[in-house]
């Protein structure tokens, strides 16, 4: 039997013998919106919890639009043209519109990469586009602290804008429950101390800081406090299917429009599975998510609910840009040097995380439950030694070895990786 995994900009074909029984776990079929601007303009005209976009924009002096960085497959080329046209038609001068790339602590997006991110040559050449830099203290305004003591620093360009708009992709997120909405603000355009404080082990080890969980999620709760402290924000949230086609658009007040998109996405991305598996084969989601090993960790965490304790996760990730940031590499080196228990004791003793070490902390979660094997074609031997997991040269051979080792021919395959979250739901 053959199956396919998302890998880079294409797919990997994997062949297994008939003796191995494959259960593919994919999104439920999603209704697809028609091409063109109409679905976007309809969402702008029929908002959730706010006035229509044209009314909101009328009389405003300027606007700041947040967009996700290159690590998210947001269809900006489809969202931004009708969004900006609506602002201009309502009277905001083109020169007074800023697109701000919500990088969080990721690197900036520039040059041809920025053009690809924007997805429209007309927007790229006619609208001011800038990156957020979380480490620049003077670029942020101090808004006090959350009830949990998290300092709130927000990019001045966004906070001081007359009309604040957020665009985002709603998908399962392994810490915040679901991405999109408030997450594009914090950590998207937050100061580094804000980001480092709500990424501590005390927050991320909470049982509700998990995929598809928002009720009681301390990260989500902190994000909502932050957006409420900022004040008036409106959001465009989109949902896409496994072919990256648009399935839903919501516009309106940031919390209400986000929750509506989340409610829609739950029906398609959360998949009930009646048993657990000793062998799970998955991907890191393909391009652009699998450009680094840093992002690959998301695909390791997503299937945990259906992993039999002691089982094996086999994951394919292109890692075309290598490991990720130098801070993440340093965290991985410490993890490999100290081991799981000592590494976690070190993190639990901090009241502020180090940059990007939280991704290594999330790697600990699947390693507590089983083993991980990585297939990639772009990490050096030196880098592979820093991954903290085993490297495999062949997916087919690794699958055969795992089913033999566990004496179980049944495997679960998740072609789309972290964009799908299987839930263990035994039959009644």
Image (spheres, rainbow, N blue to C red):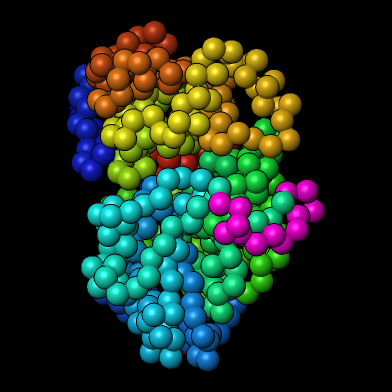
Can you tell which quarter of the image residue 256 is in? bottom right
Whether residue 8 is in magenta: the answer is no
Identify which residue is drawn at 43% across, 76% down. Answer: 97
Whether residue 145 is in magenta: the answer is yes
Compared with 261, 4 (above or below) is: above
Q: Please give left or right for residue 366 compared with residue 207 in the image.
A: left
Q: Nearer the viewer, residue 158 or 287?
A: 158
Identify which residue is drawn at 30% across, 43% down. Answer: 287
Q: Quadrant of the C terminus?
A: top right
Identify which residue is drawn at 39% across, 80% down. Answer: 95
Q: Nearer the viewer, residue 413 or 381?
A: 381
Point out residue 182 in the picture as x, y percentages from the top left corner. Answer: 58, 59
User: Could one spot residue 29 in this view of the protein?
Assistant: no
Point out residue 22 in the picture as x, y percentages from the top left corner. Answer: 31, 28
Q: Please give left or right for residue 70 compared with residue 338 in the image.
A: left
Give the magenta part as a residue range. Answer: 136-150
Compared with 160, 259 (above or below) is: above
Identify which residue is drawn at 31% across, 24% down. Answer: 379
User: Could one spot residue 131 in this view of the protein?
Assistant: yes
Q: Nearer the viewer, residue 157 or 176?
A: 157
């Amino acid at each position: 039997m053959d199956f396919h995994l998302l890998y880079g900009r294409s797919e990997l074909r994997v062949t297994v013998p008939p003796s191995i029984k494959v259960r593919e776990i994919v999104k439920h079929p999603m209704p697809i919106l028609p091409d063109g601007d109409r679905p976007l303009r309809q969402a702008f005209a029929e908002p959730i919890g706010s006035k229509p976009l044209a009314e909101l924009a009328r009389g405003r002096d300027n606007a700041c639009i947040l967009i996700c960085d290159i690590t998210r497959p947001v269809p900006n080329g489809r969202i931004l043209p009708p969004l900006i046209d609506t602002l201009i038609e309502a009277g905001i001068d083109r020169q007074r519109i800023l697109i701000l790339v919500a990088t969080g602590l990721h690197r900036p997006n520039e040059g041809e990469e920025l053009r690809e991110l924007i997805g429209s040559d007309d927007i790229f050449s006619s609208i001011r586009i800038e990156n957020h830099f979380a480490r620049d203290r003077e670029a942020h305004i101090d808004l006090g602290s959350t009830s949990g003591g998290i300092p709130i620093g927000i990019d001045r360009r966004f906070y001081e804008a007359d009309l604040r708009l957020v665009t985002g992709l709603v998908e399962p997120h392994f810490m915040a429950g679901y991405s999109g909405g408030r997450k594009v603000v914090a950590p998207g355009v937050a100061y580094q101390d804000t980001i480092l404080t709500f990424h501590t082990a005390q927050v991320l080890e909470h049982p509700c800081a998990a995929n598809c969980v928002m009720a009681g999620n301390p990260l989500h709760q902190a994000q909502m406090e932050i957006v409420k402290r900022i004040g008036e924000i409106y959001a465009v949230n989109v949902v896409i299917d496994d072919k990256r086609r648009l399935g839903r658009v919501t516009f309106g007040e940031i919390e209400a429009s986000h929750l509506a998109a989340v409610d829609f996405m739950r029906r398609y991305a959360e998949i009930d599975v009646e048993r657990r598996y000793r062998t799970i084969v998955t991907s890191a989601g393909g391009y652009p998510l699998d450009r680094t090993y840093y992002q690959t960790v998301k695909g390791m965490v997503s299937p945990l609910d259906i992993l039999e304790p002691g089982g094996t996760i086999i994951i394919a990730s292109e890692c075309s840009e290598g490991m990720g940031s130098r801070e993440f590499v340093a965290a991985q080196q410490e993890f490999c040097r100290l081991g799981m228990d000592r590494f976690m004791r070190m993190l639990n003793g901090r009241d502020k995380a180090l940059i990007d070490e939280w991704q290594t902390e999330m790697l600990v979660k699947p390693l507590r439950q089983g083993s991980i094997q990585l297939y990639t074609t772009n990490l050096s031997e030196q880098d592979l030694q820093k991954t903290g997991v085993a490297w495999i040269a062949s997916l087919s051979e690794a699958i055969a070895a795992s089913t033999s080792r566990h004496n179980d021919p049944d495997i679960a395959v998740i072609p789309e990786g972290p964009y799908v979250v299987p839930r263990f739901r035994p039959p009644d």
